[in-house]
Image (cartoon, rainbow, N blue to C red):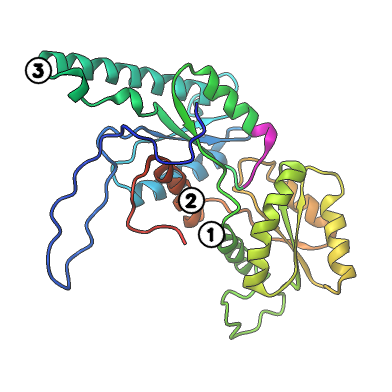
Amino acid sequence: MSSSTGPVSGLPVRMPRPRQSGRHRRPEPVTAPTGAPPLVLAVPGAPGPAARRIAEEILSIARSELPGLDARIGYADAEGGAEGYPPLDAVLGYAAAQHSARISEAAASAAAAGIEAEDAPDWSRSPAAVVVPLLAGPDAAVLRRIRRSVVSSGSAFELTDTLGPHPLLAEALHVRLSEGGLSRADRARLFTVTTAADGIVLATVGGTEAAQAAGITGMLLSARLAVPVLAAALDEEGAVARAADELRAAGSRNLALAPCLIGPEADEALPSMAAKEAGCAAAEPLGAYPAIGRLVLAKYTELLGIATPSPLR
């Protein structure tokens, strides 16, 4: 594993075709480069049908944005390798074996063709896989487990940052709140929602560090809704209730809880339990909202230096 701040070098790139001329030419399709390493989505939490559905839908979005993408799912907390829920260790082990075989095959092919070693594609400079944690923000305990799997795999993997904070998370949170009738769906506020909240508790997991990171997304959400937003950790006893009390003390009367969670990383009952304790309604977790799939892909493409036609805002 390495911690890269720029594109990984040594990745063979498929050369683009000549662009068509004319005002009405179609955008050139972008596909995954030849031999690009797989994207491994590291899914936290207890494996189950709901987690698998979310992960599969997110990777479906990513594949639609980058055709040819080799994307796989590894469950960071899978135990015993239950059928349909491959542990992250096993997924990375298989990727490492494939990477080693590719390096050996390339070397043998180059030798058979009389190609000098320095002129042959150097697959060893490309990572065996790019691991993207399915987390909206930092959760130290989960990230430690993921890093342990990456390190123990015995091959060169790249581990990206978590998905947030990011403006697209604020967009997704806004949509989930509006779907629950807890905020106006449009920025212009051209119609009234009588149940719209005048204060939001942005709930996350991962303790103080995660709450601080979520606070950045919370500021972006506050700007969208023009209401105060306070972040709190669901896994810190009483944190959500304290945030709700602070909002009420500042004048908010109709509160809502917005889970800054993808879904698998926390018990699905946790947000509703916290909302009940705080005396407010709760929106749904982010789930497989399209922006989540785009963020996952962006972590992969930015690390590898792959240009896509629709960069994130």
**Mark with earlier residue (2, 1):** 1
Calculate the distance from the C-alpha at mark 1 to the C-alpha at mark 3: 49 Å
Disc 2 marks which residue? Answer: 295
Q: Which residue is mark 1?
A: 168
In x, y percent, where is residue 243? Answer: 83, 58
Quadrant of residue 180 within the rendered picture: bottom right
Quarter of the image for residue 220 reads bottom right
Confirm or deny contact between disc 1 and disc 3 (CB under 8 A).
no
* Residue bearing mark 3: 113
Describe the element under mark 2 as helix, strand or loop. helix
Whether tag 2 and tag 1 are in contact, CB under 8 A, the answer is yes
- Residue at point 87%, 63% (across, down): 246
Magenta stretch, residue numbers: 137-142
Work out how far the residue at label 2 is from the one at label 3, CA to CA, in angstroms.
41 Å
The answer to whether 248 appears left or right of 216 in the picture is right
Residue 78 shows in this picture? no
**Residue flagged by tag 3: what amino acid is it?**
Ala
Of the pair 303 and 255, the residue shown nearer to us: 303
The residue at 60%/35% (across/down) is 44
